[in-house]
Structures are given as C-alpha cells and as structure tokens.
Image: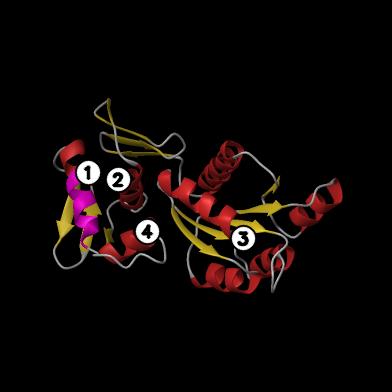
Amino acid sequence: MRVLIVEDEQRLAASLAAGLGAEGFAVDVVHNGTDGLHRATEFDYDLVILDIMLPGLNGYRVCAALRAAGDETPVLMLTAKDGEYDEAEGLDTGADDYLTKPFSYVVLLARVRALLRRRGSAGAAPRLHIGDLELDRGTRRVARAGREVALTAKEFTVLEQLATRVGEVVSKSEILEHGWDFAYDGDPNIVEVYVSALRRKLGPGLIHTVRGAGYRLAP
C-alpha cells in the first residue's frame, strides 16, 4: 500500500511516515498543497493524508481539485482546527474522514486501515483466495492449506501486489512503485530478495518467474 502525506509540520510528517513505514506502507511526504496536488495526480496512491492548513493550496482546495478530476483515492484530513463546521467543510469537499490535532497515532492508524478496508470492499475483495492460498488484506494475515504463515510487513506488501493481479505478469518496477516510497533509489533487485523469502515461506508452485518481465502468482 502506498500513502501520500501532505503536511507542513515536518516533525509530525516525519513521525507519521516512520510509523506507517514500520507497518509496511510505502510513504511519500510533501510539505505544501501545490506539491501535494501534483504528486497525488501524477502517481497512484492508496490513501492521501492531507493537512488543511497548508502553504500554497490549502487542504480543502487540494481535495476539491482531486475530486473534480475524478480521483477517488481515500482522503484523511488532518487539522488543528476543531468544530463541526470545519469538519463539515472538509467532508463536503470530498474527504472521507477527518482527524483533529492533537491525535493519537493509534487512532490515526485505525482510521487509515478502516479507509483502506472500505476502499477494498468497493473494489478489490478484502479477502483473496488463490488456490489453497488465503490472504486477508484487513488483518494482513496469510495462510496456505489452512496453515497460517507469518510474513513481514514488506513481504505482505509484495505478496498483496501479486495477489491482486493474480495470473498477470507484474514487473519489478511495478512492485517497487507499489511497495517502496518515491525517494527509494536502491537496487531494484531488492524485489528478488522478498520474492525468494515468500517462496521459502509459502512453498513451491505459487510465484513464477517470467524471465525478463517479472513475476506471476498462479495456483
């Protein structure tokens, strides 16, 4: 899952990015509304965490512009404001949820997961079954032939990308785009490391290498 944080308080943004990164999310961060709107329209995100009081374009205008362009990516708005009118304005511009600062990180993470589950229920199924492989995107649990398999956050992210496109060839670059942040400039062969770990944990016959193209998940 890839998340965009648009927040001008740099310490808060860094803290949120670190926390979500530890949960297995790929996180990009920008600090003003103009950059936020550009990044959100140029790249594919699963969720946008959007502050309201931003330099350049404020969060209301960013969200309204995304919705006017037909972008239905879930938006969680953050603000130091409070009051029902501020919340109503945020929701009226197209935000999916609203959180007032200061907030608990545990609550934010719960809201993030709820929005992603809601998006999954409207599109890709929250539970995937591929042969004897079961993958629950809500609880992030995986089982094969009824046996639960413990995966790291990044291993789950790679498997999820393959599972949501079962039968298709998924390139290394597509896996990197989905599972690593915009600033990642390391070796793209890191994908091979995680695919190898998944094969070791899940057993043979699921993840196939398509030479020169990428990987395909097939039962």
Q: Earlier in the sequence, mark 3 or mark 1?
A: 3
Mark pair 1, 4: CA separation: 17 Å
- Mark 2 surroundings: few (<14), some (14-19) or many (≥20) residues within 10 A: some
**Mark 1 falls on what kind of element?**
helix
Query: Which badge, 4 or 2, is on the more N-terminal residue?
Result: 2
**Horizontal and vertical percent position of residue 112:** 56, 45
The residue identified by callout 4 is 180
**Does 72 sit left or right of 80 as displayed?**
left
Q: Are marks 2 and 1 in contact (CB under 8 Å)?
A: yes
Secondary structure mainly formed by the magenta segment: helix
Element type at marker 3?
Answer: loop
Label of residue 155 in the image: 2
**Residue range corresponding to the magenta coloring:** 189-197
3D distance between C-alphas at marks 4 and 3: 20 Å
- The amino acid type of the residue labelled 3 equals Glu
Instruction: Give the alpha-carbon distance from disc 2 to disc 1, as whole Å.
Output: 7 Å
Which residue bears the numbered disc 1?
198
Gap in angstroms between the C-alphas marked 4 and 2: 12 Å
- Give the CA separation, mark 2 to mark 3: 28 Å
Quote the CA–CA distance across marks 3 and 1: 35 Å
Residue labelled with disc 3: 7
Q: Is residue 216 visible?
A: yes
